[in-house]
Amino acid sequence: MAQLLSRVVRARSCVALLFALALAACGGGGTIKIGVAGNFEDPLSAPIRYGARLAVEEINAAGGVDGRQLELVEREDYADVDSAVVVATDLYTSDVVAVIGHGFSGPTLAAAPVYNGGDDPVVEIAPAASAPSVTEAGPYTFRLCPSDLAHGAALARWARQRLNLNRAAVLYLNSDYGRGVRQSFEQEFLALQGEVVASLPYLGDTPEVGPYMDRLARDGRAQFIVVAGYDSEAKEILSQARRRDITIPVMGGDGLEQIFRAGDIAEGTYATSSYFPSVDTPANNKFAAAYAQRFPDAGPPNGSGAASYDAIYMLRDVISRVGTRRSKVRDAFAEIGRSKPAYVGAMGTLAFDENGDVPSLRIYMGVVRGGRMTMAEGQ
Amino acid sequence: MNPLRSLRSRVIVGMVILITLVLLIALSATSAVRSLSRTVVEETNVLLAGADAGNGLVGSVLNEIRSAEQYLLDPSPRLQREFIASGDSAYAYQHTFRQLGGLSTQDRYVINKIATEQAEIEVAYALAHALADLGRDAEARVRADRARAPADTLVADVRALTRAQSVRAIARSEALRDEAGRRERGVWLLFLLALVLGVGTTLYTVRSVDLPLRRLVGAAERFGGGDLRPVQLGDMPLELGRLAGAMDDMAARLRDVVTTVVKESNQISSSAGDFSAMSEQLAASSGQISTAMVKISHSAESQVRGMRDADGLLGQLRTASRQTADSSAKVVALGEEIRGLAARHRTDVAAAGQTLLDVREVVQTSAQQVHELARLSESITEFIDLIKQISSQTNLLALNAAIEAARAGEHGRGFAVVAEEVRHLADSSARAAENVTKTVQFIRNQVREVSGTMEIGTAKVRGIETVASAAARALDEIVTAVNQVRDASAQVAALAAQNQVIVDQLGVKTSEVATTSSEHASASQQVTAAAQEQSASTEEMAASAGDLLTGATRLTSAVSAFRT
């Protein structure tokens, strides 16, 4: 009898062990891990983390995904391509189901081959990488923002059709992002019978643009300046321009989203954006309100925040449908807006094309008025 | 039953396993070669793409630098455009580089660095161009010089990257070689396994043949050595099992044979003993013979005389015998004649018999007709009785009528005449009837007579038939008897002929015997001498019998060596 009992106990412990092994095989301790990568100290990218956190907290509060809690694995890449490769390798080898990141086009592209390679590639959802080449970064790379081609083209149309300007001087950050915006702007602007009088590269942060400004001031042909880069560079360019009494309009892509922080010199500067907190849709209103309530000191959310918030919800839907296997998640994700319905979120209607881009998204034009980025009139 | 009991099935199973292994070897080798060649093609493509991208990148950057430097010497919008286009092209190559497969993290760092260097070169020259356009040539030169260091590093980095690619390719090819070696070892291992298995199967089969075979040989040798007791050959393959069974049978039969031989040789040796004894007795008796022979020689002479008399008698016998032969021949000829006669008579008798049978038929038919006649005559008698009765009544009626006519007187006169006539008629009828009755009576007597004659005739005819058949039978018997006589006389003739020959021979023999007998007298003296010689030979025979005895004993002992 005792022998029988011990046999039963042994059988039960075997079953328990098998169950535990099965759970372990399913991806660890019951939580579903999602990687978040970006340079969270940067005001442009910080909302990626906040948006993701907000979505995860909401979902977990509502019971998780099929009873399992979501868990974020946040990794800082310092907006550096080398760090991005390290972070990507790290996340790839961990048991994350998908990665939301990275913040900028350069790190996103540097990390994409890592996520797309190997035996068990993992989905990379870029919330803000707008470089055109992200389109070809690989089947596991998706993005939830318009490509720079769209931003550049929107800029060209705005300058040519709304402001009726003919001659542009382009200053571009000599990186994937800057080149992407420059390329798409020039292409569209030339197509609209505009003229690019100068196409000038610079290097990041506080670029040396003095000689360019001197020449622009001397030539005096350019009617407006396009800054294909980020707000810190735009700030330097604006101050260099003001120093030489150049007052022609300055405009840029979504990299200039935070240019209003530059103060008075930024007044009247245009910047395209795929997102404004003020866009009046039910999903966005709900998101913006929840974001403001949860992160009162973080300022209003931007596109990357909205995109990472939407990305978490999209992942929730996909995982509850197909489980946590990376390849299945990828396939199900690619079906959104194609064989499966589009996702309507804070960013708007998200429907992927065959390259994992979302051409369905609108581009808005913003302008700095009264120290704030506002939506330009007439859109 | 174990399916591996028979040698055939063992060999088949072994071969099937061997062939399977060889197939496995072939498959493994083929797949190895395929996967290796595929990998080699992939690696070569990556390497080629890497080299292309590297060359393109370096070329574009150098082109960019060249146009930038030329612009500094001689500014023109064409060079400006060329500068920008080369930059874009270099950027595209750098992008291609990034997309190459199989890059290590280190490689990615280098590519990132190349991108930075390229950006630096471009910016330096762009600023230099701006300064040159502004006429600040010295400053422009300084900016342009800033591009030199990153340009050098870029070229070095691209080379390093290409080299890294090569190194990686070499490492990969080494890995491939290792892999190939591993596969080769695997194939060899399989081959070795097949070899071991093949040898094992062969040895196992040989062993499973050899050991039982050795046991069989041992058993055969034992049988050869004369030990015919049954042996336990133990477990062995099916085919050898059959052989072992056959050997067992053979041994059993041999045992039987040897047992019989032993028995027979014992008998022979005892017979030889008897024979030896007998020959000794023979030797003794031959002495007596020689004594008897002397007496014989005397009687031989009287025998000669007797023989002469016998010869005379035989001459008479010969004559008699010849006469017998002649008479027999005559008997035969006579018999032949009788037989021909009998045959002829038999035909005649048969014809006569048939005629008689026909007569009997006629007689019988006549008898029947006569009987019929007798019967019919009876009915005539009845008829006559009736007529008599009628005539008597008619007479009575006529009498009555005469009476009545008398009564009638005159008137009845005529009638009395008629009645008288009628009475006359009735009287004549009665008379006629009486005549008929007499005639019929006569006829009936005649018929009865004829009938009696017929009866006798019929009886006689019946006898005739018996006689005819008896005659036929007798004739047959005569023929048979004649035949027998003929055969007998033929035999007699033959015998007589033989007899004659014999008698002739006997005559010859008798005279020979006479001659011989006269010789006998002298011969019996020789016989006496011969008998003495024989006595000596008999002794020799006795000695031979002794030898035979010895031989038989030896045979017995030889056979007894067999252990049954």
Image: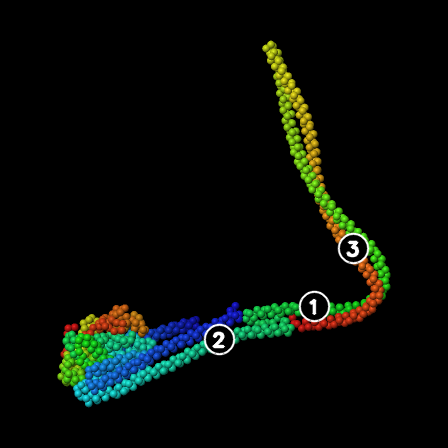
Q: Which chain is mark 1 on?
A: B
Say left or right for A347 vs B370: left
Q: Earlier in the sequence, mark 2 or mark 3?
A: 2
Q: Which chain is mark 3 on?
A: B
- What label sits on residue B500 in the rendered view? 3
Q: Which residue is denoted by mark 1 in the rendering?
A: B264
- Mark 1 burial class by Cα count in 10 Å: few <14, some 14-19, many 20+: some
Of residues B111 and B43, the one drawn nearer to the viewer in this rendering:
B43
Q: Which chain is mark 2 on?
A: B
Q: Which of marks 3 and 1 is nearer the N terminus?
A: 1
Given the image, on which type of amino acid does mark 2 rest? Leu
Q: In which quarter of the image is the N terminus of chain A?
A: bottom left
- What label sits on residue A22 in the rendered view? none
- Residues under numbered marks 2 and 3 in contact, where contact means CB atoms less than 8 Å apart: no
Q: Image height check: is B70 above or below B201?
A: below
Residue A345 seen in the figure? no
Given the image, on which type of amino acid does mark 1 rest? Glu
